[in-house]
Image (cartoon, grey):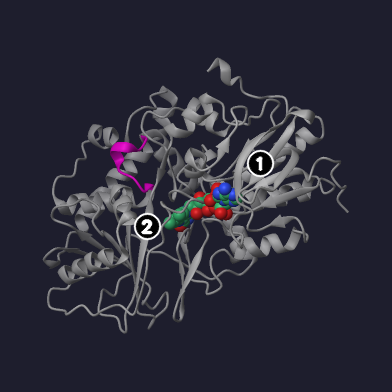
Amino acid sequence: LPTPPSPPYNATVLILGGGVAGVIAARTLARLAPSTSFLLLEARTELGGRLQSHRFPGYTLELGANWVHGTHTLGFDAVNPVWEMVERWGVQTVVSDYYGSITTYDHTGPVPYLSLLNDSLAAYATLVAHSPALAASSNLSSSARDGYSSLGYSPHTPHEHAAEYYTFDWEYADAPERTSWWASGSSTNNTYDPTTGGFSRTNHFSTDPRGFSHFLTQEAHEFLKPGQVVFNATVRSVRPFYPTASIEIELTTGTVLRAEYALCTFSLGVLQGGIRWSEEVMPPAKREAVRGMSMGVFTKIFLQFEEKFWFDTEFALYADPHTHGRYPVWQSLDHAKFSPGSGVLFVTVTGDFAKRVDAMPEEEVKAEVLEVLGRMYPGVEIPEPTSFHIPHWLSDPLFRGSYSNWPAGFTRAQHAVVRAKTGGRGRVWFAGEHTSERWFVGFLHGAYYEGVAAAEEIVECLRGGAGCAEVMDFEAL
Ligand SMILES: Cc1cc2nc3c(=O)[nH]c(=O)nc-3n(C[C@H](O)[C@H](O)[C@H](O)COP(=O)(O)OP(=O)(O)OC[C@H]3O[C@@H](n4cnc5c(N)ncnc54)[C@H](O)[C@@H]3O)c2cc1C
């Protein structure tokens, strides 16, 4: 049995947030230091964080993460740990055919421009292939747009812009102008290229009616003991507790919890503006670095119709004549591979356009989406959808965006500050998708590895090792 914490502590370690990073950190603590008491605090009533689903009649929709990006390549060692859990718990997935199953449209209806998509894919492949050389030359400040331009790729027409959007913005949730060339390439290679330590080039899409989060909740059920998780626990402030040089967490209910150590796994968006931090926990240099990174917005808009009237491919790309990123990427779930007969279709928006959509009344968004469908299908009277749903990741105070993006000009040193532990004597660790340098584009596997790494350091610290000692000198920054 775990040793009870000595008064005045509620636990030796408080884990803040029950997404992938928090749950996997808890699992790591339970495995490596089973006698250590910990409490996982989560504002919602379930685990999963940005793994969240919603039901339409007969179909489970993934509002957040939907894909395992990269699995495993035969003959190579690297295996995506999320893929291992997905396989272990029998989560249903199918391979997404991003480039082989797509129909192209513009405002006049179906228009063939797949060759432009292939050009943009080739440009993207060259862009990411250059990232190791950039890292070696320490030339890390260029944007992906600088990279494209220097490689001779520059889209001009709406079709070319749509093709570039599909290969870039749709992944990074932001535009090439605002995204680091080096970091986007490095994260892509570390995920997809087995020859540079990545997993594989396949993307598996969850179709599990229990929700994609099933793998994480099952993993949690296996090791979490009653009383180790507190739901409906929304953290309001994090500060040191001086009498014993430990950490004090105040919930929005006014309840105060104390622990020797804390691990904060809240999203970058929440770190940027959702919590009252004491200066010891969020020194000015760290606050500045946190603000310097950006939180992308990736919003899927779901529609269900009585019956399907659209493309038979998995994906469709729409090129708007005037506005870049206006309802560009469409996915059909009423497809033989997914859920035939479901009548479900969704469109994804990102970046500035997604920010606009997040702030609009849903009826207006619906009207715009139906208007675009009308342009894609000029001869079809577009029916009223029977169900419609938009997740609001940006305005949700528990996330404040979808996943982090590494801006052009943001340095590795600044990122190290975002990740660094604080609290005077190293009492608060930070982990989550945004703290992963190797897999920064908000990947589930980045969150996983960061949860493991932070918990391992805490265990080292508990054992009296170096984990506690090495605290960054923020004053010197
Ligand atoms: C729309 C969308 C699509 C995505 N698609 C993919 C994909 O296909 N594949 C992929 O690999 N990744 C994808 N991602 C990214 C992936 O979901 C994240 O990288 C990952 O889930 C982050 O896990 P985390 O533990 O770092 O953070 P989170 O999941 O955000 O966990 C943090 C937890 O802290 C809780 N919390 C926040 N504030 C407080 C507070 N004040 N008090 C208490 N609790 C609080 C939250 O409720 C949450 O449960 C997507 C994300 C989104 C939003």
Is 427 on the left or on the right of 315, as rendered?
right
Q: Mark 1: which secondary structure?
A: strand
Residue 76 in sight from this viewpoint: no
Q: Residue at x 41, y 61 (%)?
A: 391
Q: Residue at x 51, y 24 (%)?
A: 285
In which quadrant of the rendered view does residue 422 lie? top right
In which quadrant of the rendered view does residue 392 lie? bottom left
Q: Position of residue 316 (x, y in %)?
A: 27, 65
Q: Are marks 1 and 2 in contact (CB under 8 Å)?
A: no
Amino acid, disc 2: Thr
Residue ID for mark 2: 299
Q: Residue at x 64, y 53 (%)?
A: 233
Is residue 176 found inside the magenta-colored segment of the image? yes
In which quadrant of the rendered view does residue 92 lie? bottom right
Q: Position of residue 333 (x, y in %)?
A: 38, 73
Is residue 40 found inside the magenta-colored segment of the image? no
Residue ID for mark 1: 263
Is 91 on the left or on the right of 297, as rendered?
right
Q: Is mark 2 within 8 Å of ligand 1?
A: yes
- Name the quarter where the N terminus is drawn: bottom right
Relative depth, front residue between 179 and 338: 179
Mark 1: few/some/many CA within 10 Å (<14, 14-19, 20+): many
Amino acid, disc 1: Leu
Q: Position of residue 295 (x, y in %)?
A: 42, 43
